[in-house]
């Protein structure tokens, strides 16, 4: 037999910087949060271990659980809007962009992608102004086409506010699925397309029968990115509606609920332990979602090697 | 020659160093970043002129970040010598954690009434930990030109108030009242706690609520929601999405006639509005009724016990408690009214109007601030939601009262 492999110490050396930074910035704080969620303070101000007591409060006490389920429900709706609107439109845009006959494709691609690089603060502020019933251009534009009666102060109505914000977020991030799908479409070899054309499959049916199955893995990745991004969302709601996520908590998602609990709000003092409990619950929700995807969906996706 | 010159330089450096060392610099933590210029140009020079050897630096943080940033700095030991105090529990918490010193013994504390000090005391009033600086008064600011054009007299009773709103609405030139529900707090602060004291008789009702002898389901606590429910019809189109700056702009641009206000608006409105303004206190039920106003203790200043210059800081705090500071501050910031027992002469006519209500009405503070917002659910935040719901008509006043009472009773023993 050949001599034993030499110790490949350089692997450890090259991994070390990334591993150290990742541990210091991600792993340790994550475990810190998990520990905090198992602790609480007594009346006397001592920090004690309470096991799953905080979780019992979060899910058992109507005061907390109502707010939690409301936030989770809103978060789910936020995610559903993204899946139903952002991703199909993103795929459609990518399909249009990748048709060779389209002129000025580079311009459209850039224009559609630009909102993605804007700050949440700008997006939230600009859209608040556009939709403002007082100064906004939305009522004026609807008036111009004779549809003024359709205008409502959307961000201020319980029934519309969350959907409006979700659509604003879709507007901002539509560039991401578009770019990913666009890249996937471009990587389909010409031979496959030509073979399809030889068999008489062209136009829309070519997209449905040939291209779509080939980009399914990319769609899977986009879905999971959307899921993680949406369940971690906070910025847009905070910028547009404040930490109270009004009207009447109609736009409260897990991120804003966590923020209010952890840092406190107005006269409410912050509660780091319940905050950590909510953060932990969020972590497990996202972890479950990602695991479901990785183990149940991704392994069943068929891959094609060219 | 060179040697002598060098020596001279060295000596002068050493001497000037010594001279500098005598100066102590005090840093003030504050959330009032709007007031930076006033502190730098008016207040601090006046103090430094009278107290050579003490320099003061005003170092404000953004209001929304103040509490969190201050807590972090205090825990890390890097906070300033002087701490601007929020009223009630936020400061009490700091005192209990040893981040604010007991100032009960400070000579100038004698210049303040018990009510003025109540926001910065332990529940038993044994220790006072901040020197009161100012309060804000609630009422209504109106566009005097609009009132004159429409021939409306300043309303004193509720019926006159709603009649005036009807007149403005019928005329159509102005939005009757500038307020939105998007940011929520205005509905409670400038709505519920503005008009409420007339119903619950100010301190009488507020203290009874704390003692547990009145409940939020009692008529005097539900009635303000009933009045708020009538406001909805007089607010601008799309008030549901109207923010606080939107309301301020609507009024100062002359598009709205009445603005439910806090006196802190005065200096901003003076610079923005081009028309004549006036103010009236919350209208009473029937002519001749005693009027009650919300004269809310809002801002004070305390000492960080970790400060290396505690003695000099106390000199400054003593000065903050003096009538001299009161005059300086109240005139530099019209709308922030001195809590000092010595009457202060103010130049601004709108500020004079607000403060004149102290003589004819009974003063009270916001009902939710003392003790009652200590638990979960937080009564202040709940009141925001209930006030908004009342204005929008999404919850009946009676339901709102019942919901708030249930929330309060869930953690506050005297209400159980």
Image: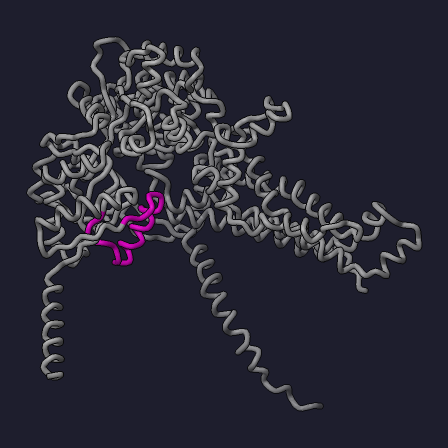
The verdict on residue B62 being magenta is yes
Location of the N terminus of chain A by quadrant is bottom right
Task: Give percent across and percent down for residue B263.
Answer: 27, 29
What x and y, as percent, mark residue B254? Answer: 38, 24
B10 shown above or below B161: below
Determine the residue positioned at 10% across, 84% down.
B1
Query: Which quadrant holds residue B88?
Result: top left
Seen at 43% across and 17% down, the residue is B173
Q: Give the answer, above or below, for where A193 lies relative to B239.
A: below
Q: Does residue A297 appear anywhere in the picture?
A: no
Q: Can residue A203 be seen in this view?
A: yes
Left or right: where B44 falls relative to A25: left
Single out the residue that lies furthest toward the front.
Answer: B1
Name the quadrant of the C terminus of chain A. bottom right
Q: Quick check: is B242 in the magenta stretch?
A: no
Give the vertical position of A232 relative to A70 (above or below).
Answer: below
**Is B201 in front, or is A32?**
B201
Q: In the rendered view, does A92 fall on the left or right side of B230?
A: right
| Colouring method of the image | one colour
* Residue interval drawn in magenta: B60-83
Q: Quadrant of residue B369?
A: top left
Residue sitting at x 48%, y 66%: A23
Which of the pair B330/B415 is nearer the observer?
B330
Q: Give coordinates of residue B33: x percent, y percent.
A: 29, 45
- Looking at the image, the residue that sits furthest to the right is A199
């Amino acid at each position: 037999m050949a001599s034993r492999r030499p110790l490949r110490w350089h692997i450890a050396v090259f991994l070390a910087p990334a591993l150290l930074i990742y541990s210091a910035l991600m792993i340790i704080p994550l475990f810190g949060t998990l520990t905090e969620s198992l602790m609480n303070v007594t009346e006397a101000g001592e920090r004690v271990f309470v096991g799953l007591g905080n979780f019992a409060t979060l899910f058992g006490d109507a005061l907390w659980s109502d707010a939690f389920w409301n936030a989770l429900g809103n978060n789910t709706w936020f995610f559903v809007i993204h899946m139903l609107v952002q991703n199909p439109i993103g795929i459609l845009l990518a399909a249009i962009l990748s048709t060779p006959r389209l002129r000025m494709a580079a311009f459209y691609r850039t224009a559609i992608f630009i909102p993605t690089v804007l700050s949440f603060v700008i997006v939230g502020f600009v859209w608040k102004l556009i939709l403002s019933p007082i100064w906004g251009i939305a009522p004026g534009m609807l008036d111009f086409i004779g549809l003024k009666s359709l205008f409502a102060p959307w961000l201020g109505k319980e029934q519309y506010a969350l959907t409006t914000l979700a659509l604003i977020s879709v507007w901002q991030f539509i560039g991401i699925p578009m770019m990913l799908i666009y890249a996937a479409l471009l990587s389909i070899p010409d031979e496959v397309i030509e073979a399809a054309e030889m068999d008489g499959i062209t136009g829309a049916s070519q997209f449905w029968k040939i291209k779509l199955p080939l980009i399914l893995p990319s769609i899977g990745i986009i879905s999971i990115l959307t899921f993680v991004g949406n369940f971690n969302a906070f910025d847009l709601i905070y910028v547009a509606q404040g930490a109270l996520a009004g009207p009447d908590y109609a736009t409260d998602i897990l991120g804003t609920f966590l923020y209010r609990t952890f840092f406190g709000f107005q006269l409410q003092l912050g509660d780091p332990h319940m905050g950590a409990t909510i953060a932990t619950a969020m972590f497990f929700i996202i972890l479950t979602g990602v695991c479901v995807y990785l183990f149940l969906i991704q392994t069943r996706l068929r891959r094609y090697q060219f | 020659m060179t040697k002598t010159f060098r020596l001279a330089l060295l000596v002068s450096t050493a001497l000037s160093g010594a001279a500098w060392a005598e100066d102590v610099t005090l840093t003030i933590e504050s959330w009032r970043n709007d007031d930076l210029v006033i502190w730098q140009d008016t207040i601090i020079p006046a103090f430094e002129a009278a107290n050579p050897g003490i320099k003061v630096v005003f170092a404000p943080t953004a209001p929304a970040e103040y509490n969190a940033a201050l807590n972090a700095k205090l825990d890390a030991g890097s906070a300033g010598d002087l701490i601007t105090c929020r009223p009630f529990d936020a400061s009490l918490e700091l005192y209990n954690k040893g981040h604010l010193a007991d100032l009960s013994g400070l000579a100038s504390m004698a210049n303040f009434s018990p009510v003025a000090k109540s926001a910065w005391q332990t529940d038993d009033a044994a220790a006072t930990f901040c020197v009161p600086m100012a309060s804000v008064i609630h009422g209504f600011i109106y566009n005097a030109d609009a009132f004159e054009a429409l021939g409306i007299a300043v309303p004193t009773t509720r019926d006159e108030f709603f009649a005036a709103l009807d007149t403005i609405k019928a005329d159509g030139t102005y939005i009757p009242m500038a307020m939105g529900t998007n940011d929520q707090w205005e509905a409670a602060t400038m709505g519920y706690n503005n008009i409420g004291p007339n119903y619950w008789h100010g301190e009488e009702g507020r203290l009874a609520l704390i003692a547990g002898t009145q409940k939020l389901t009692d008529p005097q606590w539900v009635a303000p929601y009933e009045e708020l429910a009538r406001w909805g019809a007089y607010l601008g189109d799309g008030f549901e999405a109207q923010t606080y700056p939107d309301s301020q702009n609507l009024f100062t641009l002359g598009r709205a006639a009445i603005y439910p206000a806090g006196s802190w608006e005065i200096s901003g409105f003076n610079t923005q509005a081009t028309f004549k303004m006036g103010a009236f206190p919350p209208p009473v039920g029937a002519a001749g009724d005693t009027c009650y106003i919300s004269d809310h203790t809002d801002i004070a200043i305390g000492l960080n016990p970790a400060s290396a210059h505690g003695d000099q800081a106390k000199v400054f705090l003593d000065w903050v408690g003096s009538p001299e500071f009161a005059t300086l501050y109240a005139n530099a910031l019209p709308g922030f009214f001195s809590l000092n027992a010595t009457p202060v002469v103010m130049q601004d006519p709108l500020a004079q109007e607000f403060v004149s209500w102290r003589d004819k009405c009974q003063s009270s503070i916001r009902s939710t601030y003392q003790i009652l917002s200590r638990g979960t659910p937080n009564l202040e935040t709940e009141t925001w939601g209930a006030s908004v719901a009342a204005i929008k008509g999404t919850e009946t006043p009676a339901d709102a009262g019942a919901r708030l009472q249930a929330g309060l009773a869930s953690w506050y023993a005297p209400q159980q």
